[in-house]
Image: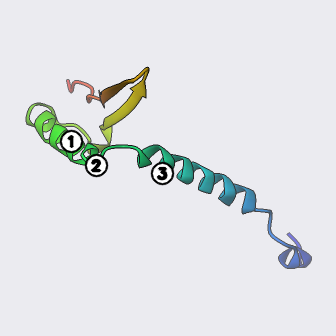
């Protein structure tokens, strides 16, 4: 790296920032139609599951999808491996 490299413009990070913004906007649009009770439902389900199994809070995912005129509530829990 020479002295002149300090005066050159940095690589274009605008594309990276633009792509990150697209991801955030897509997530927000997906959550816009979601019911308000989903975060509360997720917390309560996590409390009940933790009574029986010690799980990471990030391992519980609750999704609500609309398929063919019906709403489908999907619950996904990644259980820890059994300690030996």
Please report whichever mark, 2 or 3, sits nearer to the chain's N-terminal start. 3
User: Mark 1 Cα within 10 Å, few/some/many (few <14, many 20+)?
Assistant: few
Q: Secondary structure at mark 3?
A: helix
Look at mark 2 in the image and give the residue it sits on: 36
Residue found at x 91% / y 77%? 4
Task: Say which of 34 and 75 sits in front.
Answer: 34
Height in image: 8 above or below 84?
below
Q: Quadrant of the N terminus?
A: bottom right
Image colouring = rainbow
For numbered disc 2, what is the local secondary structure? loop
Task: Choose between 67 and 69: the one closer to the eye.
Answer: 69
* Residue topped by disc 1: 41
Above or below, 30 relative to 19: above
Point out which mark residue 2 bears.
Answer: none
Query: Is any atom of residue 41 visible in this view?
Result: yes
Is residue 9 shown left or right of residue 72?
right
Residue occupying the far right of the picture: 4
Rendered location of residue 63, percent (x, y): 35, 34
Residue at far left of view? 51
- Which circle marks residue 28 in the picture? 3
Q: Quadrant of the C terminus?
A: top left
Dividing the picture into quadrants, the one containing residue 55 is top left
Q: Which residue is the extreme one toward the top?
A: 68
**How far separated are the C-alphas under marks 2 and 3?**
14 Å
């Amino acid at each position: 790296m020479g002295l002149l490299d300090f005066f050159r413009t940095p690589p274009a990070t605008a594309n990276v920032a633009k792509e990150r913004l697209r991801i955030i906007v897509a997530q927000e649009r997906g959550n816009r139609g979601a019911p308000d009770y989903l975060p509360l439902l997720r917390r309560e389900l996590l409390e009940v599951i933790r009574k029986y199994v010690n799980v990471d809070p990030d391992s519980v995912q609750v999704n609500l999808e609309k398929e063919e005129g019906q709403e489908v509530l999907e619950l996904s829990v990644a259980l820890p491996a059994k300690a030996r």
